[in-house]
Each structure stands twice: as structure tokens, then as C-alpha cells.
Amino acid sequence: MNSMSSQYRIIAVCTGNICRSPMAELMLAEAFRAKRLTGAVVDSAGTTAYEAGRPIDPRAARKLAAHSIASDRHVAREWRPEWFGSRELILALDVDHYGWLRQAAPDRASLAKIRMLRSFDPAVADKDALEQGIEDPWYGGHTDFDTTWDLIQASVPGIMEHVRAQLQGQDGQHHSNNQHNAGQRVRSIS
């Protein structure tokens, strides 16, 4: 945990920050709220500035709204290098984001924070990162956003369990993710 904060900060990362990563951000924030898991803060960003300043994709907003999750305050933004130091968990939505983040990571401590979001999904947790990605629904239709929802949702309980364990760590300190990552290459602030 960042010594300047008593919160466990999570960021979800996709390409443009208008579909997958804001869906993950808002779904996690809602799950933390519903389970009263305080101490966790979730946000999101894109690896590119293509969509910076734009709202969430209307199809993603529609899917979230169907589950009573508001997304009207989301504004897309590009990843900033300083977030490697201020986030405890960096969730890549697809393998290209995972590779991009790993390449951009300034040190081993930052590398240890990067995980595929679906590495928390029991159905694929033991698979290679190449099999844990969520394809970009932007190119598809409503059913692609349904699939994105389902794949993110399958990972939410594992992420919540991980965060709960981190928040309950010995002496208030967070356990390192180094051991897990060696084998694998709340609240929303939107």
C-alpha cells in the first residue's frame, strides 16, 4: 500500500478507456460497495489517448445501467506513468495491455502490481496470459458487451477476495504480489 494512503488503489486498463476498463472499474466499485468492502478505490485508464475526454461507450453504459450501475460521470483518460507508484493493483483487460504495461513498468515493484484481470477468474486463473484476455467489444454489438460483462463479472469475486486479504494484511501492510506474478508474464473515482 502506498505509504501516503490508507486505501488500496486499483486501476483497470484497456485501450481507449471507453468500454472494458470503465466497465471493470464501475463493476468492481459496485461490488465493493455492495459487500461494504471499504478501503479500496478503483479507477481506470487507457493505454492510448484516442478517446481521452470522451464518455463511456453507449453500449457499455447500457449494459451497466441494466444492472443499476451508473456510468454518466466517466470521462476517458490516458495512462500516466506515475500511476505505477500510486496503485497497488494494475489490471490489464487484454494481453496487449498487459504487455504494454509490463514494458512501460519502471521497476520490479511496478511489474509485481500488473495482473491480467481474468487471472482472478477461476476458470482461467491457471492459464497463460494469452488465454485470459477480454476482446474489445467496441468492434462488435450488444452481445459482445454482454460477453465482456460476463468475463469481468467472473473475475470480481477473486479480485474482492484478493483485496480483502491485502486490506487485512499483517500490521496493516499489504502482501506482495511477486510470487503470483513470477509465473505469469470502494470506490470509483471516475
Image: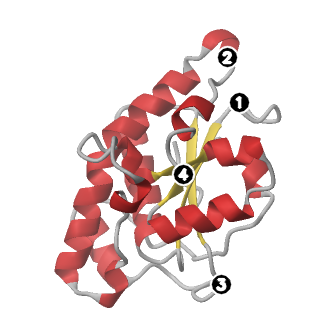
Instruction: Point out which mark residue 6 bears.
Output: 1
- Residue type at the position of mark 1: Ser
The residue positioned 34% from the left and 73% from the top of the image is 135
Looking at the image, residue 92 sits to the left or right of residue 133; the answer is right
Q: What number is the disc on residue 172?
A: 2
Q: Are discs 2 and 1 less than 8 Å apart at CB?
A: yes
Disc 2, SS: helix
- Residue 140 seen anywhere in this rendered image of the structure: yes
User: Hey, what amino acid is under mark 2?
Assistant: Gly
- Note whether 102 is above or below 168 in the view shown: below
Q: Name the residue under label 4.
A: 185
User: On the image, which quarter does residue 152 sit in?
Assistant: bottom left
Local SS, label 3: loop
Q: Name the residue under label 3.
A: 49
Which residue does the image show at 33% across and 75% down from the upper left? 60
Q: Is mark 1 on a helix, strand or loop?
A: loop
